Image (tube, rainbow, N blue to C red):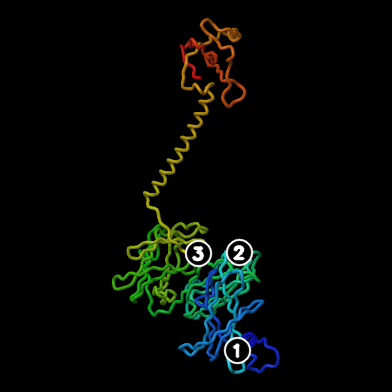
Amino acid sequence: MFATLTALLCLGLSVGLRTPEEAGIYRKPSLSALPSPVVTSGGFVTLRCISWQGFDRFILTKEGAHRPSWTLDSQQRHNGQFQALFPVGPVTPSYSWTFRCCGCYRYIHQQCSEPSDPVELLVPGVSGKPSLLSQQGSIMTFGQNLTLQCLSDISYDRFALSKEGGHNLPQRLSERPQTGCSQADFLLGRVSLSHGGRYRCYGGHKFSSKWSTPSDPLDILVAGVLPDTPSLSVQPGPTVAAGENVTLLCQTRSQRDILFLSKEGTMVSPLRLRSKYQAQQYQAQFSMSPVTSAHGGTYRCYSSFSTSPYKLSHPSDALELMVSGPSGDPTSPPPGLKVTSGGSEDQFSTTESGQWKGVQGLKPYQNVLIGISVAFVLLLFLFVLLLIRHRQQGKCRTSAPAQLLMPRKRPSVRRRGDAAMKNTQPEEGVELHPQVGPLPCPGHQGPSCCQTSSNGHLHVPISPSPQQRPTLTSPLGTWGVLL
């Protein structure tokens, strides 16, 4: 009963006459999820309710039909704040996980604060992932207004934005610029150091606790945090012909282990390389080979630390690269950008999603081997096709496949004009089997296999007698007939 009454005071649901203190005049505490409000299915999370007010206890309430609540005594932190840590889990996508908390005094007439802002735990699902982008690009400077846009071709009703290491999960109702599409803009305000990091967004539906697969990550880098300014140069020069090899060299005298190369006017994330100390400078080489008109544009480079890659130096001076020669297909992605740092080489290409990914280039002898292999396969295919056709024709020229390998001599029938055609009696020395006539071609209907040669002789397949092998005599000699 005591815990229920305390929870009612926390939510402002108590009945009867209440003093202003009982109505919740104390400043509301802050509720956050540790380490993140994004929890995998079956995972656990800790909800922290914290306040500068010296409350004796904190009450955590789960929103829903039954509104269950939990109470913990507060603990004072080293900085003077009071908090309580509530373990929650296992978390599943089947239920809604929205919580609030409030702080209460134990002995001062059950006075409690206003409830905190709600915190919803997000369990990623399997529905189609949305896309996350920044219209201003990935590299921001102090004072710029940062807006992240989450959009999808699925009609989601709401979107949520998460940041790695962040404890909040802001949500926005979606807009539908056209049928079947949905999007939401997250206005994050003027850029400060805290805006740097990796972001993802999720799509969800009303009255459902299920969320989509997370979007691909988007890195927001804040320039101007580190004091140095790198330099950027190009070899052989800022104006080159298409097909040449070009190298962009970024270097700084400050001790930095990461160097970035960005191209203005593109949504592509900047390239990142480890630096190499050489000639009293930290440097990295970004090589393009061969260049096309797609490589033309304005480039800048930045330095950073691998331990805090979202904090960049001031940008280098802009370098304009001009490529003369035939322009490539504007609908195709730009050619590969080979990147080298010291002795290691990676190759990057631009994909339709705007990310540069590594690909391996083929050497000339590998291309030759591939061409020979394809030609060999085609020739082998043609040979098999001709072999099958030859065997089918051979079957058509034989009347008894079982005796294909037994050549036998047959008596020939001499044809003398039309009268010889009508004479069905065998000549002397020729014995005709009384039941054997012209045999049909295997697998064919209609005409028999008997063929009339160009010299007027009619070749008739005849079964030999057991005692002798008859022959067919022709003006050209005696031939064995294949049966």
Is residue 133 visible in the rendered image? The answer is no
Q: Amino acid at mark 2?
A: Asp
Q: Amino acid at mark 1?
A: Ser
- Residue found at x 51% / y 61%: 352
Image depth: mark 2 or mark 3 in front? 2
Give the structural element (helix, strand or loop) at label 1. Answer: loop
Residue 147: x, y in percent?
Answer: 55, 75
- Using the image as rendered, state which of residue 72 and residue 29 is in the foreground: 72
User: Which mark, by number, is residue 359?
Assistant: none
Q: Is residue 184 above or below residue 56?
A: above
Badge 1 crowding class, 10 Å Cα cut-off, few under 14, some 14 to 19, many 20 or more, is many
Badge 2 crowding class, 10 Å Cα cut-off, few under 14, some 14 to 19, many 20 or more, is some
Mark positioned earlier in the residue sequence (1 or 3): 1
> Distance of mark 2 from mark 3, alpha carbons?
18 Å
Q: Amino acid at mark 3?
A: Gly
Badge 3 crowding class, 10 Å Cα cut-off, few under 14, some 14 to 19, many 20 or more, is some
- Residue found at x 46% / y 63%: 356
User: Which mark, by number, is residue 354?
Assistant: 3
Return the residue at label 2: 153
Q: Which quadrant is home to the N terminus?
A: bottom right
Return the residue at label 1: 113
> Distance of mark 1 from mark 3, alpha carbons?
48 Å
Residue 63: x, y in percent?
Answer: 63, 78
Is residue 44 visible in the rendered image? The answer is yes
> Distance of mark 2 from mark 1, alpha carbons?
43 Å
Mark positioned earlier in the residue sequence (2 or 1): 1
Q: Is residue 9 above or below residue 419?
A: below
